[in-house]
Structures are given as C-alpha cells and as structure tokens.
C-alpha cells in the first residue's frame, strides 16, 4: 500500500513494519504542508506504532515553523514511533537534524545517517 502527496514520494510500510518516507527533490516544506503531511501520514498508518525511515532528498528544506511543528507533533505522538532513522545528505541537513534529535533524544530511539542501508540496519535492531 502506498500514499503520495506534494511533498513526499509515495510512502509505504515495509513487511517488517518500517514506515519509509522519502522527500521529493528540491521541495521546501512549509508549516501548512507539514500539517497536511502528518495528518495524511497518521491516516495512512491508522495510528499504528511503527519504526520510521525518513529520507530527506539532497535539496529538500523545511522552514522553521514546519520544523517546530514536526518536533511538537512527534513529541505528542511518541507512543506511535518505535524508532526513527533519518537519512540526510547536506551539511545544513545534518546540523538541522542534529538539533531535532537533541530535542527528541529522550522520547524514542532516533539517529541520523548518510546511508539508507545503514539506517535500515539500525532500525531492524529496535523492537516495536
């Protein structure tokens, strides 16, 4: 089962219960788009507890309001996130993601990577 919108490539749940979310190239995510995206994501998953693999495309960006909303939403929905691996490419993405991970570090297991397969391997080590 896949779902798509204006910000993400089709997202899907793998056989081993990992929600894979890939951002489209050159996208700039605004607050309104983040609200819509998260609403769609939770409708798609049926609010089931899952591991998440988030792949941010090389040129994707997220405005400050969208990042703050994402952080608060993930904090509020922490029981639905078993673990989260974020794949980033640019230095700016690494710095932004590192700040985000500091915000949620005590809420659920999370880590950023520059390699998708290493991120998947790390997620496989976490139980639901």
Image: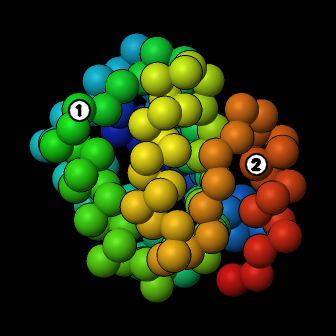
Question: Residue 35: x percent and y percent?
Answer: 20, 53
**Label 2 to label 1: alpha-carbon separation:** 24 Å
Residue 36, percent across and down? 22, 50
Asked whether 47 or 73 is in front, the reply is 73
Circle 1 packing at 10 Å, graded few (<14), some (14-19), many (20+), is few
Q: Which residue is mark 1?
A: 63
Q: Is residue 123 visible?
A: yes
Position above or below: 126 against 36:
below
Percent position (x, y) of residue 17? 69, 70
Q: In this orientation, which residue lies closer to the viewer: 1 or 100?
A: 100
Residue at 29% across, 24% down: 28
Quarter where residue 18 is shown: bottom right
Q: Which residue is mark 2?
A: 119
**Residue 4: which quarter of the image?**
top left
Q: Which mark is first along the chain, 1 or 2? A: 1
Residue at 46 percent across and 23 percent down: it is: 92
């Amino acid at each position: 089962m896949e779902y798509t919108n204006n910000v993400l490539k089709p997202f899907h749940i793998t056989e081993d219960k990992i929600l894979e979310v890939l951002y489209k190239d050159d996208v700039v995510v605004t607050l309104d788009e983040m609200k819509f995206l998260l609403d769609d994501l939770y409708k798609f998953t049926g609010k089931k507890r899952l591991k998440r693999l988030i792949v941010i495309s090389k040129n994707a960006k997220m405005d400050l309001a969208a990042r703050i909303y994402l952080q608060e939403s993930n904090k509020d929905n922490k029981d639905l996130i078993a673990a989260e691996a974020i794949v980033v490419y640019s230095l700016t993405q690494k710095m932004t993601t590192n700040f985000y991970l500091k915000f949620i570090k005590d809420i659920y297991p999370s880590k950023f990577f520059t390699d998708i397969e290493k991120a998947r391997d790390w997620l496989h080590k976490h139980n639901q």
